Image (cartoon, rainbow, N blue to C red):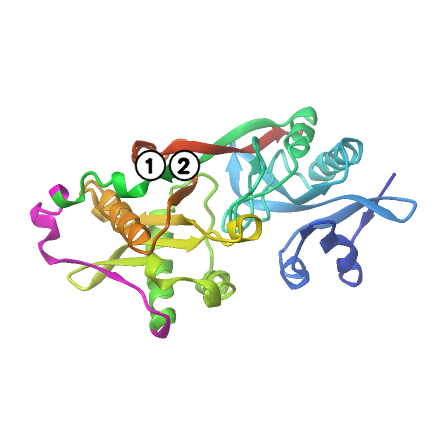
Amino acid sequence: MKINIISETELEKFCDFENFILDKENVKKCGALESVIVEEEGAVLARASLWNAENRIQNKKTGYIGHFAAKDKEAGLFLTGYIKEKAKEYGLEYLAGPLDGNTWKQYRFMVEDNKNPFFLEPYNPLEWPEIFAESGYEVIGEYYSVKVTEPEKKFRVSERIKKVRFYSDLIIKKADKENFGKYINEIYDISVKSFRNNFLYSEISRTDFLSLYLKIKDIIDFDFIFMVYKNNKPIGFAFGIPDYNEGLYKNKIETVILKTLAVNPEYHNFGLGAVLLEEFHKTAVDKGYKNIIHALIHQSNMSGKISEKYGEIMRKYHLYGMVTA
């Protein structure tokens, strides 16, 4: 086996890896220090990219390993060993991953029950987290998704909460396609305030943020974008999308995914997250959905405590890290 550092002219070889296809233009612009493949007799056996991270972990200069894929454990271990040594050469004292440059993009490994992944869920063979563990990585972030069945039976608190004076001048409305740009800009403003203290948060430009949503604009169900305004100021949102993957293996879609829920930190402690959650659930029931997934919750996130009251944990994910010295 040998390592090949990929140039722009070889991106197809890097990106077209079995079922784990990457967008060539995104990889070209991703800002990685290196993107490499493991080859043997002309066959690509593994791939990964290495980034210099904005964040420091354990007060150490940190890098990220992402775009990871491997056909087998031997090739994966060979690759992670190479990335560790290259990280040292770049002066990186700590490595975290899998993480494709920043947490606005793909990151985390699914670590159990990888059958029937939902739409936009991180997906990987269960051998990949084993490769990281055997390479010396330890778990530094734990996440999970919650599945709510029979959501029509789960309405709990919102009507009582809404009687608080705070809600007297508060408006919750659904977005619409005609004003897509306006709503996504408002979602950006709320997101950068709400997520700023999240683990491994990094800044994202408004342009890059908008491009993430433009990619899925045509498949968004705008009934599942809720905006919250107080005194005409946007202060929170919930964003969801049908589980289009479910249609591939069941020939029908009975599940909707609550992908993101955020409230401006200035308006925490008023129960607004719970109110948004129930508005989302009610719409799902009205539209005939039988299941709701609360997706990719960090273990320390208080919203997870709310989600667990409505359903059960369906899947877990890990983020890994290691000292390179």
Q: Is residue 266 above or below residue 57?
A: below
Front residue (pair 114, 152): 152
Which residue is identified by label 2?
Answer: 146
Farthest residue toward the front?
Answer: 251
Q: Amino acid at mark 2?
A: Val
The residues colored magenta run: 160-178
Q: Is residue 58 visible?
A: no
Percent from the top left, x then y, of residue 209? 46, 60
Front residue (pair 159, 59): 159
Percent from the top left, x then y, of residue 152? 27, 43
Q: CA distance from mark 1 to mark 2?
A: 7 Å
Front residue (pair 37, 303): 303
Q: Are marks 1 and 2 in contact (CB under 8 Å)?
A: yes
How many C-alpha atoms fall within 10 Å of the one at disc 1: few (<14), some, or many (≥20)? many
> Left or right: where does residue 227 sit relative to residue 197?
left
Q: Is residue 251 visible?
A: yes
Quadrant (top left, top right, bottom left, bottom right) of the N terminus: top right
Which residue is identified by label 1?
Answer: 307
Q: Residue at x 33, y 40 (%)?
A: 150
N-terminal-most mark, 1 or 2: 2
Q: Residue 281 — which label?
A: none
Quadrant (top left, top right, bottom left, bottom right) of the C terminus: top right
Q: Is residue 214 above or below residue 93?
A: below
